[in-house]
Image: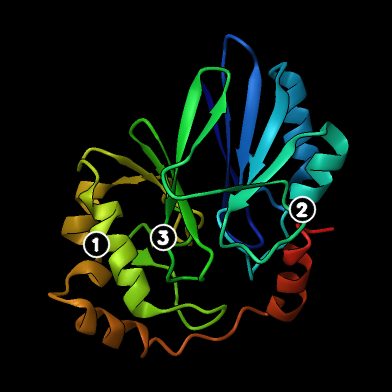
């Protein structure tokens, strides 16, 4: 397997490129519009064909590159079935498998950060979008976010995975690239709660500023960045 973790400095977004060494088919998770040429160059350098691109949810802090990648490479666009993005070509359901040349990625519906948030699991690699972050969790105060939904997504789904599962989040703001489910259980301050009410209390009192370009980015991302 070929695996690349790419970082966007402006939005602190991680983008993931996964490919099969044998068939050279590739998939990208959470592409950022401004970095399209970097992705294309990386694909060319590795002699890969992009066949699928996934967005974990409708982003508020950057514009997705899904539509442009579709135009340039004819790849399929994929999101979870709860997405409001009508132009997405494939909408996957809970536990549905996304396949590329022998590799299988399972969709996990993890609402809470937004109502359409999905995480994706490939073997022992978890791509959690904005649901579970390293030493943090995704905010729940816009786009139909809900703290109790987030609690159940995290505690009843993601934290039930084996502790050695490697966590690759959608963002990190402190230079960390990966973690494990075991580390997050022990050290993530948001997860040191006894029930959903305690978690809801934390999330409802964060008082975070709204993402600067949210009112522009969300409508664009409903169109996959077109």
Relative image position of residue 29 (x, y in whole percent): 59, 43
Image color mode: rainbow
Residue, far left: 194
Q: Quadrant of the C terminus?
A: bottom right
Mark 1 nearby-residue class (10 Å; few <14, some 14–19, many ≥20): some
Q: Which residue is at a point 83% across and 46% down the rendered structure image?
A: 68
Query: Does residue 43 appear left or right of residue 102 in this picture?
Result: right
Residue carrying label 2: 33
Mark 2 nearby-residue class (10 Å; few <14, some 14–19, many ≥20): some
Question: Which marked residue is nearer to the observer: mark 2 or mark 3?
Answer: 3
Q: Which mark is residue 225?
A: none
Question: Which marked residue is nearer to the observer: mark 2 or mark 1?
Answer: 1
Residue carrying label 1: 155
Relative image position of residue 207 (x, y in whole percent): 44, 90
Mark closest to the chain's N terminus, 3 or 1: 3
> Can you say whether 206 is above or below 143 in the image?
below
Label 1, secondary structure: give it: helix
Which image quarter: residue 22?
top right
Label 3, secondary structure: give it: loop
> Can you say whether 14 is above or below 220 in the image?
above
Query: Does residue 13 appear left or right of residue 198 in this picture?
Result: right
Q: Which residue is at a point 75% across and 50% down the rendered structure image?
A: 65
Separation of residues labelled 2 and 1 (CA atoms): 32 Å
Residue carrying label 3: 110
């Amino acid at each position: 397997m070929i695996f690349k973790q790419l970082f966007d400095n402006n939005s602190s977004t991680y983008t993931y490129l996964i490919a099969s060494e044998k068939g050279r088919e590739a998939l990208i998770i959470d592409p950022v519009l401004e970095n399209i040429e970097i992705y294309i160059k990386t694909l060319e350098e590795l002699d890969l064909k992009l066949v699928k691109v996934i967005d974990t949810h409708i982003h508020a802090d950057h514009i997705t590159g899904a539509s442009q990648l579709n135009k340039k490479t004819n790849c399929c666009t994929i999101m979870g079935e709860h997405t409001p993005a009508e132009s997405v070509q494939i909408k996957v359901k809970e536990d549905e498998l996304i396949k590329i040349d022998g590799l299988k990625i399972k969709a996990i519906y993890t609402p809470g950060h937004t109502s359409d948030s999905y995480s994706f699991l490939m073997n022992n690699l978890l791509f959690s979008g904005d649901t579970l972050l390293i030493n943090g969790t995704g905010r729940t105060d816009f786009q139909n976010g809900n703290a109790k939904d987030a609690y159940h997504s995290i505690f009843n789904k993601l934290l039930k995975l084996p502790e050695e599962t490697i966590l690759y989040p959608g963002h990190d703001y402190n230079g960390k690239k990966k973690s494990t489910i075991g580390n997050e259980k022990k050290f993530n301050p948001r997860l040191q709660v006894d029930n959903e009410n305690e978690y809801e209390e934390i999330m409802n009192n964060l008082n975070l500023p709204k993402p600067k370009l949210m009112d522009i980015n969300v409508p664009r991302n409903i169109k996959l960045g077109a």
